[in-house]
Image (cartoon, rainbow, N blue to C red):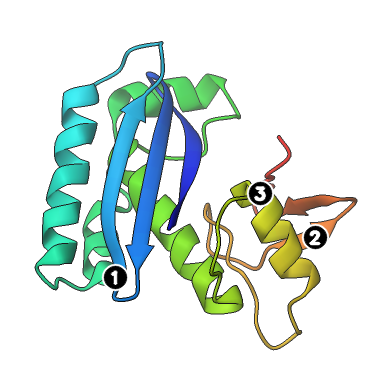
Amino acid sequence: MGITEKVRVGCGNLYITVNYDDNGICEVFTNVGKAGGCPSQSEATARLISIALRSGMDVKEIIEQLKGIRCHSTLRQRANNKDIKVLSCPDAIARTIETLIDIKKVGGIKDLNIKPAEEIEDLIANTSNKTKIKCPECGNEITHQDGCVICPSCGYSKCS
């Protein structure tokens, strides 16, 4: 089971799939959109993440290593395009893995056949005040407002 997120990066769209089984997160796949980009680098990163996970490496360590990596192409595009909310392809992969971890913590989701945005909205709507879902952009609390999932801290929105 898993999720696929479409993330806007400097070179276009990056589609990130994070799968898990009974033992936890076990593999990551990436695919770049039609706009090009560096598919070999993203694929290599995803393969190495998958090998590391299957070898027993702590997923939090992988996230820590990837999150915050910057790409000049993404940063240049980000300055002009508010749809780009990540720093690079590795940063996007780390944030997608974090999203799956947060979703699983809150809901213990068994079946992920609905869109991730809908899952997050449903989880937030059914979550007690004790358990909060973190924003994939800034790590602060996400809320459900006006039929959309938003982060009041940084403006992140699943509806944008």
Does residue 102 appear left or right of residue 19 in this picture? Answer: right
At 52% from the left and 31% from the top, the residue drawn is: 84
The three-letter code of the residue at mark 1 reads Lys
* Nearest to N terminus: mark 1 or mark 2: 1
Q: Is residue 59 visible?
A: yes
Q: Of tags 2 and 3, which is closer to the observer?
A: 3
User: Secondary structure under badge 1?
Assistant: helix
Q: Please, what secondary structure does the residue beneath circle 3 have?
A: helix
The answer for how far apart the CA atoms under marks 2 and 3 are is 11 Å
Circle 2 Cα neighbour tier, 10 Å, few/some/many (<14 / 14–19 / ≥20): some
Residue to which mark 1 is pinned: 60
What is the distance, in whole Å, between disc 1 and disc 2 at their CAs?
Answer: 26 Å
Query: Closer to the N terminus: mark 3 or mark 1?
Result: 1
Circle 1 residues within 10 Å: few <14, some 14–19, many ≥20: few
Mark 3, Cα crowd under 10 Å, few <14 / some 14-19 / many 20+, is some
Task: Identify the residue position indicated by label 3 in the image.
Answer: 117
User: Can see residue 153?
Assistant: no
Q: Earlier in the sequence, mark 2 or mark 3?
A: 3
Asked whether the beta carbons under mark 2 and mark 3 sit within 8 Å of each other, the answer is no
The spot of residue 68 in percent (x, y) is: 32, 50
Q: Amino acid at mark 3?
A: Ala
Asked which quadrant contains residue 27, the reply is bottom left
Label at residue 144:
2
